[in-house]
Amino acid sequence: MKNFRVKVQNADGSFDSVSIKAESAREAMDLAGIRGYNSVDAVADETRERISSGKIPDSELYHFTRLFATLTRAGIPILETLELLSSRIDNRYLRGALQGIIADVHDGTGIRASFGKYPLIFDKSYLQLVEVGEESGKLPQVLERLTGMLRKRIQLRGMIVKALTYPVLVMVLSFVVVVAILVKIVPRFKDIYSRFGGDLPAITKFTLKCSDLLINYFPVFALLVILFVALIYAGKRTATGKRFYDRLVLSLPLFGQMFHTYEIAGFSKSFSMLVHSGITITSSLDLISQSIDRVQIREAIFEANEQIRTGRPIADSFDRQMPWLPELLNRMVAVGERSGNLPEMLDHVADFYEEEFNNKVETLASLIEPVLIVFLGVIIGGIVVSLYLPIFGMARLISQR
């Protein structure tokens, strides 16, 4: 079905337009008539088709879900809730999707099916939970759990960004400063040394050589940097490249453990919420494995789920996927499985790994500042010392005379 923009005439003679999904323009006009509109014309709404086909930030989805949960809990009908939300949404992709969902719900389509037409906005776990809420009649409660999951996801990603922003910013600024020194300042010292003649220290020769190479071949270096970044980006889009990149990230000193804990914290929270909502273990793991970013952890979850399907205990299946599924997670799951209290134990697991992730981010932040200071001191200080060594030598010769 396509989106059509139907031009309708109001009772006072003015004109307006409504969005309707139909197979043809004629059917769209007929549907508008059934709804009580005096239809005049209908055209395919290609703009809205494009607008409703893009991804949206997690923050937009969180605010939408939070308002959706609040309004439905207040007893406002679904269709009226969606219409109200559509008028308040600023993001054009989400607003376009909501307009299509409203048209579908108005025509009698279920909520899950209507949301499912926009997979770039609503992922499979979101749709599965909406379906559970729709079928159980507990949509407000499910939406509140979704809101909590999205909030945690945003908080965890925010902490990742916070932890990486400072070192990345410092490294970029350091690179700019080093290039500026080599291009603008070092050549002046080279001119001075060429007038006096004499042999220069090895470290000074090395600095002058780096400056010459950078000045003479700057376009080549810039092209190589661009190609390197492009190759990394293109490689990540291939299965082999993505696998290699993820393994490299997870094996980095300091950062590797932080990224691993981030994935496990997100996995634990999603697993807890899905099981609490009444979704089976295997279905929950199916949904979660599709949302995990790192290939190694995603495959570990998938393999554990396959073993659970064959009848193997959950904890035993998880144990076989170490170290990607850590031992502490497996032990806590084993306790919950034996006691028949798995959902509550998963809550404890989620809370523990969120706290563990917070601690790792704080530890990283406290360690990375002195490391960067030492690194910058060695690089920039080394350049400065190499430039002034000949001057110190000349001053010593003059004093001896």
Image: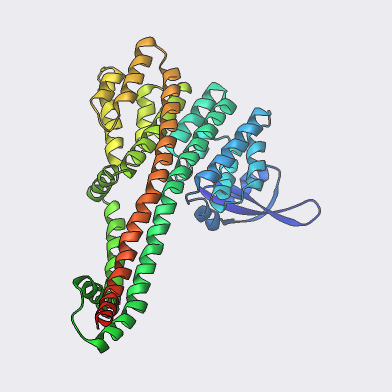
Name the image quarter holding the C terminus.
Answer: bottom left
Q: What residue do we see at 25% from left, 76% from top?
A: 393
| Furthest residue toward front | 401
Please state which of residues 30 and 186 is positioned toward the viewer in this rendering: 186
Please state which of residues 156 and 38 is positioned toward the viewer in this rendering: 156
What is the x, y in percent for residue 153? Answer: 47, 38
Question: On the rendered structure, is 332 left or right of 204?
Answer: right
Question: On the rendered structure, is 269 left or right of 102?
Answer: left
Q: Is residue 20 above or below residue 227?
A: above
Q: Is residue 49 above or below residue 102?
A: below
What is the x, y in percent for residue 83? Answer: 65, 42
Residue 270 makes an appearance in the image:
no
What is the x, y in percent for residue 54? Answer: 48, 51
| Furthest residue toward right | 12
Q: What residue do we see at 45% from left, 23% from top?
A: 347
Q: Is residue 213 above or below residue 98?
A: below
What is the x, y in percent for residue 69? Answer: 60, 32
